[in-house]
Image (spheres, rainbow, N blue to C red):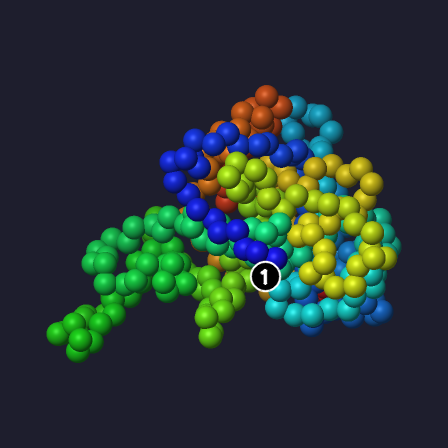
Amino acid sequence: MSTVEASYGEATARQKVRSVPLSHLSIELGHLYRENSDLEGPGLARHFARVAPQVEAAKLLYAPASGKPVRMSTCYLIDDYFTEFQSPAIVIPALQEAAASAGLQIDYLAREAGCAFADGIDLASLVERRLVPEPSAGADGSRPPVTQTGWLSNGRRSPVGGEAMGRVPRWGPPEESSARRHSIFVDVELWSEKDGHRTWSSPFLAAVWQLLRLGMLRFHGSPVAQPQPVDLSLIREWDELPAVIQLTPEPAAFSAYQTFSVLSGRFLSVEHAVRVILEQVSVDDAVINEIAERSQREGFVLPPEIVRRINYFLDGSIAGDP
């Protein structure tokens, strides 16, 4: 499969963007990682039993103010980027059965590898090229850009230097941009590289995942990684599947005005990093405006900032978050 490089410019900015169907709310029911992929044990059923009450609460908390019924879809993310699993024909029915035991259904299943590459498009690079890092007060240009280092922060880092600079700089603390009294400084690794191969980090792929769920990503004006139904009996390997798989016959739209994720508390640091990333991603104005106009016509008030459309329930009692 050939890679389609992402590029931007005035021509891209002038392109008319195609809209995507939108629910009011996209609810993420969890993540599946190799270390908690015991499909025959009780862990999955226990997980969905803890998730079910939060789904009911979210229907009330994030419903339209107009009082109309909430359009809601559910999704589940599986990590096939860093690890390998049994056949999809085994794993996916096990997930569906465990969810059903708690009265839930999984409308869409997404592959984490699909957040890196989907439909011949390098999605991760697409988002990387949309990064607009916050200017750091006092920066002298000596630090290489994020596209070279693979690191993105939410403020000013501590001074660095040495003999090559002719002096030893005085130590200073890092400082968060727009800090409230005290800083909470975060420096996020977006990718690592070895032998010319780039491996995207979990926070960066999770940021792409949130943008997909919010219907924010386009390539030359067209939506990317749109859900597709599949016949699992014909599938042997995960990379034979689309990035997002439609599992139920007539679900509400995959993308939504807002997202809600029920996750283990151990994901707190990852999701903090996701927000740092998304605060510095520049989404096409045409996409932002089109979604804003649609939400207004529906009487559904959206926060202007993307990160404020992302909501969580982080539960320390969801051990391992299968």
Query: Seen from this angle, which residue lies furthest left?
Result: 166
The front one of 226 and 66 is 226
Q: Identity of the amino acid at label 1?
A: Phe
Q: Quadrant of residue 115?
A: bottom right
**Residue at left 65%, top 29%?**
64
Residue 207 lies, in percent from the top left, at 53, 52
**Residue at left 59%, top 21%?**
297
Residue 297 visible in image: yes
Residue 194 lies, in percent from the top left, at 47, 74
The front one of 9 and 22 is 9
**Residue at left 34%, top 50%?**
134
Query: Seen from this angle, which residue lies furthest front?
Result: 2
The front one of 108 and 231 is 231
Residue 299 lies, in percent from the top left, at 60, 23
Q: Which residue is mark 1?
A: 267
Q: Secondary structure at mark 1?
A: helix
Residue 125 lies, in percent from the top left, at 48, 54
